[in-house]
Image (cartoon, rainbow, N blue to C red):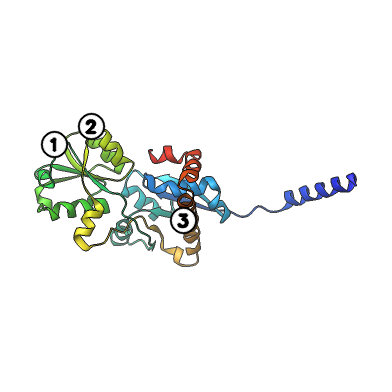
Amino acid sequence: MRGSLKALMLGVAMAMMLTPAIAQTQLTVIVFPGVQNLPMFSAQAKGLFRKRGLAVDLKFTPNSEELRNGLAEGRYQIAHSAVDNAFAMKDKANVDIAVVLSGDDSFNRLIVQPEINSLADIKGKTVAVDAVNTAYAFQLYEMLRQKGLNKSDYEVKPVGGTGQRLEAMTKDKTYAAGMMNPPFSIRAEKAGLKAIDTGIQCARRLSGLGRLCAPLVGRGEWRRGRQIRAGLHRRAALDARSQEQTRGGRAAHRAAEAAGGCRRAGL
């Protein structure tokens, strides 16, 4: 009996060793830093990407230009970004782009220096943006337009992504305002800056709707047989988010923290 059991166990072990590993599709995904990435960190930690045959390497982008250029050059296969970057790639570089749309309000805050008490106070001052033609910049322009300020009433300076805008505003007080999302907006207020308006309120004043953001953007060849990879990537992230919501967020947060997600997100 013992001999038969040992032989059985040996046979199972050999079969497991000889079973070919599931092929993993390599995906390099570029994202802006922020808490919106926690579901992806959680999906990595829980093996949800691997379960769907994906080996996902998440990269942070310092600004929109790197995201656009890297996607166009094929260094990244998927980008999480506002859809303005897809339009810019098509309009300026004529890159064939596919957009898998999703949406949230991005938790955007208009962060200002302590002495700014109203949006009208920004007149004649400098605002910090990623690039002059990106979604957060357009949102800032619209906020100021709603309060009677035209672009000729203030100076626009591109300084880079949200982390760079926070650094610029804390080190150089001539930067009067900039758009930020968590965790940078939280860090900004802790540093003595303040939030004076929100992106969602701006959108509601404009149209009664929140601003769509953070879709998946990929090269156009995904339409020709590779859309499924974007769908699998999205599905794994949604699975992680669903688990986070179902379990009160604790389990997913611990998994993301274990994977370095909280630290990498700036929390």
Task: Judge whether residue 254 can be spotted in this image.
Answer: yes
Q: CA distance from mark 1 to mark 3?
A: 41 Å
Identify the residue position indicated by label 1 in the image. Answer: 115
Point out the tag, 3 or 2, that comes first from the N-terminus: 2
Front residue of 243/225: it is 243
Identify the residue position indicated by label 3 in the image. Answer: 238
Crowding near the residue tagged with mark 3, few <14, some 14–19, many ≥20 C-alpha atoms within 10 Å: some
185 lies left or right of 51: left
Q: Tag 1, which secondary structure?
A: loop
Residue 36, horizontal then vertical, whole percent = 38, 48
* Residue shown at 49% from the left, 52% from the top: 243
Examine the image and state in which quarter residue 71 appears. bottom left
Residue 41, horizontal then vertical, whole percent = 47, 46
Point out the tag, 1 or 3, that comes first from the N-terminus: 1
Front residue of 90/172: it is 172
Front residue of 175/143: it is 143
Point out the tag, 2 or 1, that comes first from the N-terminus: 1
Examine the image and state in which quarter residue 222 appears. bottom left
Mark 1 touches mark 3? (CB < 8 Å): no
Determine whether 217 is above or below 121 in the image: below
* Residue shown at 23% from the left, 32% from the top: 171
Q: Amino acid at mark 1?
A: Glu
Q: CA distance from mark 2 to mark 1?
A: 15 Å
Q: How many marks?
A: 3
Q: CA distance from mark 3 to mark 2?
A: 38 Å
Q: Amino acid at mark 3?
A: Leu
Crowding near the residue tagged with mark 1, few <14, some 14–19, many ≥20 C-alpha atoms within 10 Å: few
Q: Tag 2, which secondary structure?
A: helix
Identify the residue position indicated by label 2 in the image. Answer: 171
Mark 3 touches mark 2? (CB < 8 Å): no
